[in-house]
Image (cartoon, rainbow, N blue to C red):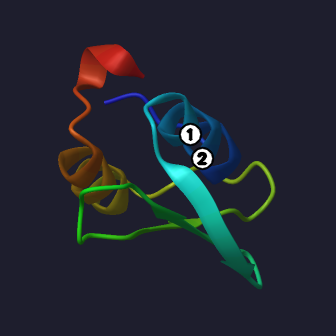
Amino acid sequence: MKQISGKHFASLVSRHGWILSRVNGSHHIFTKAGQTARLVVPVHGNQPLKIGLLRALMKVVGLEEKDL
């Protein structure tokens, strides 16, 4: 699986209809109308997200590996 940074993933999520609700330190919290889940993306500069976290976030958003 390709590793991407939290900054890149945050921009990808916002293109899929998620709205940046607030920022708490380095964690960007996204919400989407009609969904109860909220998405917390750690943005630590250009450091890549860990594979397990990336897969869990992709599952919530509904992304596949080809969408990265």
Rendered view: 56 above or below 15:
below
Q: Which residue lies furthest to the front in this view?
A: 34
Q: Residues within 10 Å of mark 1 (few under 14, many from 20)?
A: some
Image quadrant where one finds the C terminus:
top left
What crowding class fits label 2: few (fewer than 14 Cα within 10 Å), some (14-19), or many (20 or more)?
many
Determine the residue positioned at 54% across, 32% down: 12
Residue that mark 2 sits on: 10
Q: How far apart are marks 2 and 1 (CA)?
A: 6 Å
Name the mark on residue 14: 1
For residue 61, side relative to residue 28 (left or right): left
Q: Is residue 37 above or below residue 54?
A: below
Q: Name which residue type carries label 2.
A: Ala
Left or right of 54 in this view: 12: right
The tag on residue 62 is none
Residue 47, position as x, y percentages in the image: 69, 54
Q: Are marks 2 and 1 in contact (CB under 8 Å)?
A: yes
Q: Position of residue 13 (x, y in %)?
A: 49, 40
The N terminus lies in quadrant: top left
